Amino acid sequence: MRAVDTVCALSRYDYAGAVLKRYLPVNGLVFDVGAGDGITRPKVLGAGHRWRGFDLEPINDLVQTWNLSNPCPVSDTPDAMLLLDVIEHLGDCDTALSNISAIARKGALLVVTTPNPRWSKARWMTLFTGYQTCFQVADLDNGHVFPVWPHVMEYILAKHGFEIVEYATLDGPTCWPSLSALHRLPIALASVLVCKAVEWRDNSACGMSYGVVARKL
């Protein structure tokens, strides 16, 4: 897997908006796959693009139904697609990416974000509990079934015709404990020191999530 290009404190929504501004000419058509209630729509419109939302179970009229196990329900060809914190929910990632790839023209962007298995907290959580952060047994209730390591992300995207052009960690490095944590400062401080030591050694450990920008070959 390539080295981290960017360590940033952006959320996945802000990251997607920033990526579209940097990589996509104005007035591009953006498919937001897994759009939820359309939370990313203002970011896409603010970047000067057209937005079209899809979700497995739409909760408003802005978003259209698309089960990624099936081909895309529309014939439009997007200039970019967003897959923000969706891939970890996919029980059949291969079929989903095949259907996404099928509508992507050459040069189209794909922006994917997902929980970062290399996050410093995830590393010590796995060490002490045997389960990775965001993929604990309780996270099955959130539909988290597929932890995607960056080298696996690169492999599965390449398999479906995408080349990664940017790899960034999101949500920022570990913060120092606040004054409100003073009553448990020794424990909190020890945890932060461990995380910061890991992040100092390896910047891929910065950030609870990571994102990649890929282009269709």
Image (spheres, helix red, strand yellow):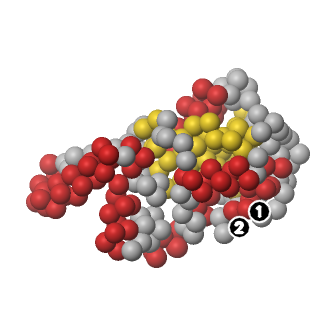
Q: Is residue 27 left or right of residue 192?
A: right
Disc 2 target residue:
92
Task: For the residues labelled 2 and 1, say whether their Cβ atoms are less than 8 Å apart.
Answer: yes
Instruction: State the image coordinates of residue 184 (x, y, percent, origin top left).
Output: 13, 61
Q: Which mark is residue 167?
A: none
- In this view of the protein, which residue sits in the foreground, 66 or 196? 196
Residue at which label 1 appears:
95
Crowdedness near tag 2: few (<14), some (14–19) or many (≥20) residues, C-alpha within 10 Å = few
Mark 2: which amino acid? Answer: Asp
Closer-to-camera residue (158/185): 158
Q: Where residue 138 sits: x, y (%)?
A: 45, 74
Q: Is disc 1 surrounded by few (<14), some (14 to 19) or many (20+) residues within 10 Å?
A: some
Question: Is residue 132 shown left or right of residue 23?
Answer: left
In the rendered image, the vertical position of residue 131 relative to residue 104, given as above or below: below
Q: Percent x, y for residue 17?
A: 57, 34
Residue 57 shown left or right of residue 71 in the figure: left
Residue that extends furthest to the right in the rendered view of this protein: 75
Percent of width and height locating residue 158:
71, 49
Quadrant of the rendered image containing residue 186: bottom left
Q: Residue at x 43, y 67 (%)?
A: 132
Residues under labels 2 and 1: Cα distance? 6 Å
Residue drawn 50% across the image and 48% down it: 210
Q: Give above or below for 156 relative to 136.
A: above
